[in-house]
Image (cartoon, rainbow, N blue to C red):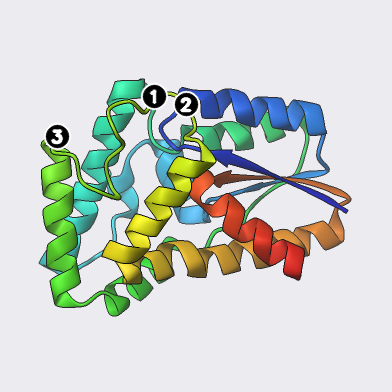
Amino acid sequence: MTIYLVGTSHIARESLKKVRAAIEEKKPDCVAVELDANRFHALKSRCKRKTELRLPLLQKLIFTLMQKLQDKIGRETNIFAGQEMLNAVKIAEEKGIPYYFIDQDISITVDRLMREMSFFAKIKFLFYLAVGFVGVPVPGLSAPAEIDLNKVPEEEFIEEAMDELKKQFPAIYKVLVLERNRHMAKNIKALGERYENVVAVLGAGHVKGIGRILENA
């Protein structure tokens, strides 16, 4: 059993090349993608409103700003956030390779996140998103000016970003990183038991954690 984890940045053009190169070079028996069915259909339609979740006003403001911030950065790199995941599915289809969505359902993730975050944490995060959207650098959320957004960040930068996220927003780190890592690692392991060669396309922030879980499984 061979499992190859491909770390991407959802708004980096380099990610598109990394995904294609990995699938063509590794010739996997299946491709695992960091998506759930709802997010896949939202990306495919390019219209997130079609899967918009019903949320209270504060939570809705948070997710609206998160979406707009991603879209803003995506315009800078001229690709939409998550395009590399869609490309992974497209390449798998072209080559007749089965693909699987391994992420937790977005509705479960959102529900868990809103339950774990305190009111103060939600206000703080909303503030960080707002100042980040207008261009003010925010520790843990904004990339330094010297970072090339078209490239997948180096592991050192990813580690620093994860540490800052854990420090500033422990609930977000727990739900969006740790819990999803465990969920995706479980699904990847199950695929590894069915297929000899698996390529998993993941956001770079998940690679180290999922790799560690798989090593210890």
Provide the secondary structure element on which disc 3 rests.
Answer: loop
Residue type at mark 1 is: Asp
Q: Position of residue 130 (x, y in %)?
A: 12, 47
Q: Does residue 30 appear left or right of residue 213 in this picture?
A: right
Q: Position of residue 120 (x, y in %)?
A: 13, 73
Circle 3 residue: 135
In the image shown, does 136 or 31 lie closer to the viewer?
Answer: 136
At horizontal 60% and vertical 61% (from top left) the residue drawn is: 184
- Labels 1 and 3: the sequence-earlier one: 3
Q: Does residue 54 appear left or right of residue 50 in this picture?
A: left
Q: Are marks 2 and 1 in contact (CB under 8 Å)?
A: yes
Query: Which numbered dot is residue 151?
Result: 2
In the image shown, does 32 or 202 lie closer to the viewer?
Answer: 202
- Labels 2 and 3: the sequence-earlier one: 3
Query: Badge 1 local density, few (<14 within 10 Å), some, or many (20+)?
Result: few
Circle 1 residue: 148
In the depicted structure, whether residue 116 falls above or below residue 9: below
Residue 176 lies in quadrant: bottom left
- For the N terminus, give its image quadrant: bottom right
Provide the secondary structure element on which disc 1 rests.
Answer: loop
Query: Which numbered dot is residue 72?
Result: none
In the depicted structure, whether residue 211 falls above or below residue 202: below
In the image shown, does 119 or 82 lie closer to the viewer?
Answer: 119
Residue 181 lies in quadrant: bottom right
Q: Position of residue 197 (x, y in %)?
A: 84, 46
